[in-house]
Amino acid sequence: MPTVYLNGQFLPLEAARVPVMDRGFLFGDGVYEVIPVYDRRPFRQEDHLARLRASLDGIRLGDPHSAAEWTALIERIVADAPWDDLGVYLQVTRGPGPRDHAFPRDIRPTVFLMPLELPAPPPALIEHGVAAITAEDTRWSRCDIKATSLLANVLLRQLSVDAGCAETLLIRDGQLMEGSASSVFLVRDGVLLAPPKTPLILPGITYDVVLELAAAAHMPTAIRALSAAELRDADEVWITSSTKEILAVTRLDGKPVGNGEPGPIYRRMIALYQTYKHTVMRGKAAP
Ligand code: PMP
């Protein structure tokens, strides 16, 4: 059974308990991160911890730990994990208190870390892509905060599960935002297009990696608002996340994207990404 961390203690997952009055349980009053770890080496940990701090700021909760303390907690979770590749899930809630929407005084945050199994994206998905649907974005207007209150994301993701698809792409006021649990990119006329970071999307760490790799490879790129119409007739559509890495969307709302196979720019980017990932992992050679 995996070892988890809860408020100062390392213990087996089944032994970890939080009080029912925890505001994470009552209100979803908390934030979280998932840090991918390959060959027991965290990938982009500093970026994830910076986004955690931004999320904590966004909900007016002080960071309970220094960067060094977070690093030590993550190291222990990774060392005790039953897998070499994993995700470190970490969550901070405002903690237990009387049930009142307003913040109680003298409340101590709840800090929880656990390892998650992180299977590599199946080669068939990289080779052939995935299907997605679109839906109206029903989330709130602070999607830049990685909040544990994920009800809209849960309902939106389930729409794609019900349709036998891998992701739901979200449209707000006619503009493409992101997926229910992923960032989104388009390719049109050879140009890689990404929506800008605004409070209406989560600033994806993989999104940053993709744009860095595109810049280093001198790929034509534009960061600008993208319309649902541009999504509909894009040459390529990609989704990215720390757990999915980069996947081509080859069917959208039941119709093929481009010729229905991952496009040439996708193939170039996934190769760059895999090389970069293996370089970061140092120990392992690129395939
Ligand atoms: N947007 C949303 C809504 C997400 O849940 C995720 C997954 N964390 C992403 C984008 C992608 O972010 P990242 O690349 O940091 O995993």
Image (tube, rainbow, N blue to C red):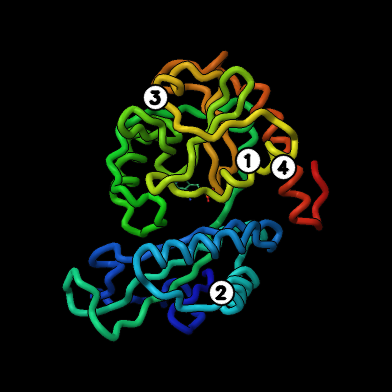
Residue in view at x 59 percent, y 20 percent:
261
Q: Which residue is mark 1?
A: 211
Figure check: 106 above or below 214: below
Identify the mark nearer the N-term, 2 or 1. 2
Q: Which mark is residue 244?
A: none
Q: Which numbered mark, 4 or 2, is in the foreground of this view?
A: 2
Q: Name the secondary structure under disc 4.
A: helix
Which label's residue is closer to the chain start, 4 or 1? Answer: 1
Pointer 4 residue: 274
Give whichever of discs 2 and 3 has the lower sequence position.
2
Residue lying at 45% horizontally and 32% vertically, measured from the top left? 225
The amino acid at mark 3 is Ala
173, 135: nearer the viewer: 173
**Label placed on residue 70:** 2
Q: CA distance from mark 2 to mark 3?
A: 40 Å
Which image quadrant is residue 175 in? top left
Query: Upstream in the sequence, badge 3 or badge 4?
Result: 3
**Looking at mark 1, is its residue's CB closer than 8 Å to ligand 1?**
no
The answer to whether residue 268 is left or right of residue 243 is: right
Residue 76 seen in render: no
Q: CA distance from mark 2 to mark 1?
A: 27 Å
